[in-house]
Image (cartoon, helix red, strand yellow):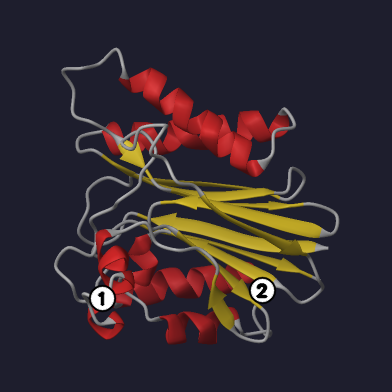
Amino acid sequence: MIEFGHGTHVGLRRTRNEDTYYADASLGLFLVADGMGGHQHGEVASALVRDAMVDLVSRGQSLIEAVHGAAERMQAHARPSFDVLPMGTTIAALRLTVDGYEVAWVGDSRVYMWKQGLRQISHDHSLVQALVEAGQLDPAQASQHPQRSVLTQALGVTGAEQLHIGMARGQLEPGIGFLLCSDGLTESVSDASIARTVGRTDLASQECVDQLLLSALDGGGDDNITVIIVRSS
């Protein structure tokens, strides 16, 4: 049995929500996309990738194939419009099968797993993360770095030959949960606080999502906020 909750909020500083998401237990597909590009381009980018992912997975493609296909559609869409602002989007996606799961991501939208504690599965494609890995930045300082929102990978911005899609897979067991979110959540709420909410077995997934959205708003709500929680039982 799969139980899930989902929600998005424009936040307290933005006038437009460039995040989008998809949650469908029958298809086993859950995703969050955080668009960028100014004006309406972020909204267009995230919606285009969402729709491409749903279409390609529905046609039987694997999650990684669908991300590649979505990136190609983004490039094809942007190519005729040389005079407009560039646009791109992150993607964090989860696909559930009868007994397994696979996740794929590009950018800094995240996938966490809950299994007797919260663990980040995805790996941010960001300048700050690259500096941490190179030993040039203390991990404790990463969350306050002025360039923490600078991405090293994004669909529509990174060329197909340079695109690096993160992925992981594993067995689906009762009691496992997943959290997918845009950086509007993780910029405003600590992992420890997120874990306390996700781990509340007295709350349904939707109640946990609602609580996390409120926590992000209480934390400043500087960006669009999108959250999906999926639980296997």
**Furthest residue toward top:** 80
Q: Give the amino acid at mark 2.
A: Ala
Q: Where 189 sits versus 170, above or below?
A: below
Q: Which residue is mark 1?
A: 142
Q: Is residue 137 left or right of residue 122?
A: left
Distance from the alpha carbon under mark 1 to that under mark 2: 32 Å
Q: Is residue 51 visible?
A: no
Q: Is residue 47 left or right of residue 66?
A: left
Q: Nearer the viewer, residue 126 or 83?
A: 126
Q: Where 122 sits versus 220, above or below?
A: above
Q: Is residue 8 left or right of residue 209?
A: left
Tag nearer the camera, 1 or 2: 1
Of callouts 1 and 2, which one flags the residue occurring earlier in the amino acid sequence?
1
Q: Residue 119 location in percent, x, y?
A: 55, 77
Q: Residues within 10 Å of mark 2 (few under 14, many from 20)?
A: some
Name the residue located 61 percent from the left edge and 55 percent from the top edge: 103
Q: Is residue 74 visible?
A: yes
Q: Which residue is mark 2?
A: 204
Q: Residue 168 location in percent, x, y?
A: 62, 59
Considering the numbered disc 2 on the image, is that residue within a helix, a strand or a loop? Answer: loop
Q: Nearer the viewer, residue 230 or 214?
A: 230
**Where on the picture, by quarter, is residue 150?**
bottom left
Q: Give the amino acid at mark 1.
A: Ala
Q: Where 14 sits versus 160, above or below?
A: below
